[in-house]
Each structure stands twice: as structure tokens, then as C-alpha cells.
Amino acid sequence: MYTRKNQRDLTGAEKRSFVSAVLELKRTGEYEDFVRLHSQYNIADADSGPRAGHMTPSFFPWHRRFLLEFERALQRVDPGVTVPYWDWTTDNTPAAGLWAEDFLGGTGRSRDQQVTTGPFAYKAGNWTIRNGVTSGKFLTRDLGRPGSPISLPGKDELASALNETVYDADPWDSTVTTGFRNALEGWSVRTVPRERNHNRVHRWVGGAMLSAASPNDPVFWLHHSFVDLVWDRWQRRHPDSGYLPRTKLRSGDPQGGRVMSLDEPLPPWNVKPSELLDHGKLYRYAE
């Protein structure tokens, strides 16, 4: 059992260890496997085939396993490293500590959004984008989107998701208007801004975080570590409201064969959502 900490509570040595392990995965090329995998399973409602990673009930268990795979890769480099979490309801400005020179670096410069500070800046020589959606080789960010400003989700918005009493609902996609999964994942056509919670964080960071290849920005992992923690909080608050759908959808259902129920294996690991509901034997969160 190990502990994932709030990034604001990391010591200088812990920050350096995390950064060094991430850079080592990048050096060996293993990091690119994670970027490609996330892109592969970011399948929209209108696309064909099974949807495991986004716009689907398995959003949380799929990303929990994805995060675990990344964390295990980091620990093969340095056994003491874990993935910290970023509570974006509290550390909610570009001046927050995670954007410091000694950790993730800051926002991109105005003319091309290129990140020029910190260990993941292209000019530092250790972070070339190889699997982005464009041909650009440098990491990009646009924190807060100064040209058309948006804010990070606040505590009230997060609380609204946590107050949902059911996990998910038919039609099990981005159009669902009730349930915890979509309230936190954040697809909406009824709210302004349209993006909520998880999705608006991607939008607020901007740059590389806007695409299916969002793990190109290492903040992706801190963001999803917090999403995983919030899922844990929801489970503790609603212990009688489990994962849905519980059983395989009938063949005539428009989502039949596309949405994974409780005991249908998630690609590419062949692990069921039911096996990913409890992380307590592997790690805990320091809150």
C-alpha cells in the first residue's frame, strides 16, 4: 500500500523524483505508449465500436487502470514515486505551485502557446511531442485561456456532481443529464460554459490537453489522480449506489456492444469494472 499526495504537499525531493521518473519514461519511449493508448480509446458517441474510455460509464474504471499502469511504469524507474493529485478547486490559478519552474512549468508563450519553462519545455531538450494531433514538437498550454477567459471548476460545481445519487443512466453517453459519471466527466449542452468539472479542466489548461493525446502534458496524470479521488469520495458518500449498468445491455439497445457493464472486460487489459471499484489494497489518498 502506498499513498498519493496532494501535489501542494510534495517535498522538493518528491517533486524531483516524480519529474525524473516521467522524463525517464519519455527517454525510453515508453511514455509514448500511454499517449497512443489514450488516443486509441478516446471514442466519441458518433464513432463506431466499443467505447471504454470516454463518454461512457467505464470512464472511471478505465482511467483508474490507465493511471495504475502509468504509476507502475514510474515505480519501475523509482519505487518510491506515486502520482500526486491536483485539486483544481483550490489550486485554481496559473500562479499555483504545480506550474512552478521546478515542477510542471508554466503556461505557453502568447504567440504559439509553447511552454518555455520547467523540465517539460522543448528547449530543455527532454520533451519532444511525437504523438500529438499536429506536427508541433513542443508542449503547449494556454492556462486560463486569456484570449477568452474561463475559470476552473469550483467547489460548488464539484459538490453538485458528488450529490448525484445514481452512478450513470441511459443512454450511457455524453448526452446523459443525470448521474455522477457525466456530471463529473463534464459533457453538457445545457450549461454555460458547456464543459463541466473534468472537461473544463482540460479546456482551462488548453494546448495539448485539448486533444485525445492529452497525456502529452504531464499534468494529465495529476488531473486524473484527482478525478479518481473524487470517484472514491462519491462511492463513500453513496455506498448503496454502485456501478451501472450492472448487466450487459440487450442486443437491440443502441449502446449494446458499445458500453461495458459491471462484469464485461475493459480493453485493452481484459479487466472488468467490478475489479476496479476498490483501490484500497493498492493505494490510499492523503486528504
Image: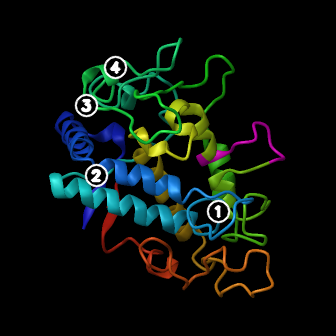
Nearer to us in this view, 164 or 134: 134
| Real-space Cα separation, disc 3 to disc 1, in angstroms | 36 Å
Q: Amino acid at mark 3?
A: Asn
Q: Nearer the viewer, mark 1 or mark 4?
A: 4
State the residue position of label 4.
117
The picture places residue 107, in percent across and down from the top left corner, at 46, 22
Image height check: is 247 above or below 186? below
> For the magenta stretch, what is the residue range?
189-198
State the residue position of label 3.
126
Residue drawn at (40%, 48%) of the image: 221
Residue drawn at (48%, 23%) of the image: 94
Upstream in sequence: badge 3 or badge 2:
2
Residue drawn at (70%, 60%) of the image: 47
Answer yes or no: is residue 225 visible.
no
State the residue position of label 2.
30
Q: Amino acid at mark 1?
A: Arg
SS at circle 2? helix
SS at circle 4? loop
Dividing the picture into quadrants, the one containing residue 177 is bottom right
